Amino acid sequence: MYINQKNVPYARMNDSSSATRLHQNDGFQLIAQALPDAVFVVNADGFITYVGDKVEPMLGHAPEDILGKAFRELIHEGDRSGLPHRFSEVQGGAWDARFLNPNGVPMWTNVSVLAPTANGVLDTGDMIVLVRGIRENELPRDRTMLYRRALDASNNLIVVTDPCLPDNPIVFVNSFFLEATGYEREEIVGQNCRFLQIGPDGVRDDYQPGFDGKPGLDALREAIATGSDITVVLRNYRKSGEMFYNELFLTAVLDENGEALAFVGVQNDITARIEAQSTLEDREKELGAFYNRAELRMGILEVDGEQLVHRSANRAACELFGVKEVDGATSKDLGFTDAETRRWYEHVRTFRSGDDVAFETRFPWDASSEDPGATHFRVLISPIGDGPLFAYVMEDQTSTRALEAERRRLYAAVESLRDPVMITDATLNRPGPYVLYVNPAYTSVFGYEAEEVIGKTPRISQGAATDHSVLARMRRKLEAGKPASGEVINYKKDGTPFLLQWEVAAVKDETGRVVHFVATMRDVTDRRRLERAVLEATAREQERMARDLHDGLGQVLAGTRYALSAVAGSLTQEDHREASTVRAAADQIGVALNQARTIAHGLLPTHLENNDLPTAIAELARDVSQAYSVVCSFEGGLTVTPASHSHHLYRIAQEAATNAVRHGGAHRIDIRLEALEAHPSGFGASLTIVDDGCGIDAGSASSNGLGMRSMHFRAQSIGGELRVESAPGERGTQIVCLFDAETSQTAGSADREAVMGID
């Protein structure tokens, strides 16, 4: 740093009398012209007051561009530190420095300072500065500068300290040190090196035990105190606060008495190496932890002649072998049978010939393949480098084998089922889903071979008579994550239609995501045809019985009641004690007549002949109320077509109401027939029977009896769905039949009856 760094105005310097005397001196002018050097005159503050004629041709600077500037601005920043000292010396001197051309490109020059004096005092107040370029083959006259240039050219961080001065300050740092740390030379020259230990929080990081296997601060302090050489690794900090690891090679420069004149520190930033080594150590620890804690049995083998020597084994392998460690043990030492030893050795030899090695074995080594207590292993062996060492991994396959055996059993069971089974992917949008598997029964029922349907959609068996409203309801259920069931017309390969009953369920992975659908199917055409025939025969028998009750027994009871009433009217109580008995008998016959008519109406609802389902159910509610002395109500006025559907719905209401009284002990029954809007099921209407009885146990006879089965069948017969909501111990049961109220214009019902042979 200069004593006065102000840029003194050029006018002031031109007005200087001392400068005028020196510049106008004829002898000075002659000398300046005769010298081979570029001549400058610089005042005591370091500013240029005169520029010689040779400056521009030698150094490239035009006089008018640099006159009045500080001379230090023309010197490379790495060589400026000595300028204040040079200019302050009366006797002047010479040294080497890098001079900057107008483009800032440095060139090595020799700089000499001539200070005119009189009795040891500056004569004029100005100094003459001579600058001469150094040729490549010319040795610098300033040997110190030569050494300095060599140090500056180094790619290491170099620092020199002076232990002869208080606190052993820095007296030199090279350019690479400045670049690496981010400091300016003026900020660190004169300081102790400990400033590099100041962290970003301003606190000195003085706990430095050493890193990378090298000593730290305590050892460094001792070496400085004793004037010894040492290598240490420290945590240092750049000016930005960034930490770096500094490998310091400290050399003491000793005098003839062994006293330290200086310390030269050559430093390397080894942060990347330390971090890489730390990462490697972490990886080694992780691998070591994995090796020792892994459930896989792992170890290292060495081929020693005809033997396999176990050099290492993890905890799981040692536990298998029944030892704490295996270092140097042979296979025989670890309990291997001769046959097992040969098996391992032969496979290692195979690998050494270039083939991969993987084989299966069992433990205990002499266990048979069918031994239920044996542990089954798959052994993989791979070489370590090109030497005789091999790594092995033993994977326990016992559970896998058990799962595979279970899979084979399940596969055999599905293959042997008499009902078709299909597995598809989880794609519901067209053109999916795609068939992944069908069992042999599918071929028997549908006529397609497996290869004809795998990869295709199940829609290949649908056709014109397929009720797509049923399929739409199935899709909604599957999308909601629920199983779906139903019946719909499908077609065999030869085009024959048949009634297919199916149940579809989702298969989920461990995350709960649906990955497949499984469908079990059954051809129920003949069964539904038989059930329909039974119901029709039952209906005909009920009609006959109803007419017999109404026309036969009803007339007899009516006539008998009339006769008894006439007899009772002719008798007086005073003359005939039996008169009251006769009247009572006539009344009882009247009650029996009403019951017979009620039963006849139940067997053959007259309003159903006109397809008036609401009126028929309303009469049913009245009859149930009278017959069982309960409250039975009806609400609804929905018209249902075709008439066959009305008959099925009436019988469902009748069966549910009578079961509620007989088996549930209900005191109140509510029946509703209503239309539905945007119901999640996709159906457009519902018949609901709710009671306050004792509920239905899922395992009871009433839950699986003929009545419940007939209600389910009747719901399926009209393309609907029956839902029963009840639980044992809870009051009440709700039976809901979901259906479409108007189906006369759809093909589903007619096609279904046609498939079952009903005209």
Image (tube, rainbow, N blue to C red):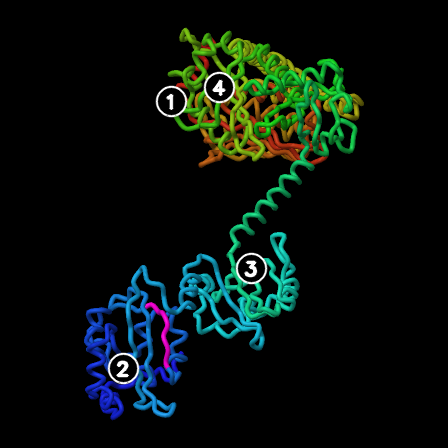
Which quadrant would residue 49 be assigned to in this image?
bottom left
Numbered badge on residue 248: 3
Q: Amino acid at mark 1?
A: Gln
Question: For mark 2, what is the residue?
Answer: 41
Mark 4 or 2, closer to the camera: 2
How packed is label 3: few (under 14 Cα within 10 Å), some, or many (20 or more)?
A: many
Mark 3 and mark 1 lie on one chain; the one further toward the N terminus is 3
* Tag in front: 4 or 1: 4
Chief secondary structure of the magenta portion: strand
Q: Nearer the viewer, residue 261 or 194?
A: 261
Q: Are marks 1 and 2 in contact (CB under 8 Å)?
A: no
The residue type indicated by label 2 comes to: Val
Q: Magenta part of the protein: which range? A: 92-98
| Circle 1 residue | 745
**Tag 4: residue type?**
Leu
Q: Which mark is residue 436?
A: 4
Residue 18's spot in the image, x, y percent? Answer: 27, 91
Q: Could you give the CA–CA distance between mark 3 and mark 2, rounded to whole angstroms?
A: 44 Å
User: Element type at marker 4?
Assistant: strand
Judge whether 714 appears above or below 525 on screen: below
Horizontal side of 493 relative to 342 (left or right) equals left
Q: Earlier in the sequence, mark 1 or mark 2?
A: 2
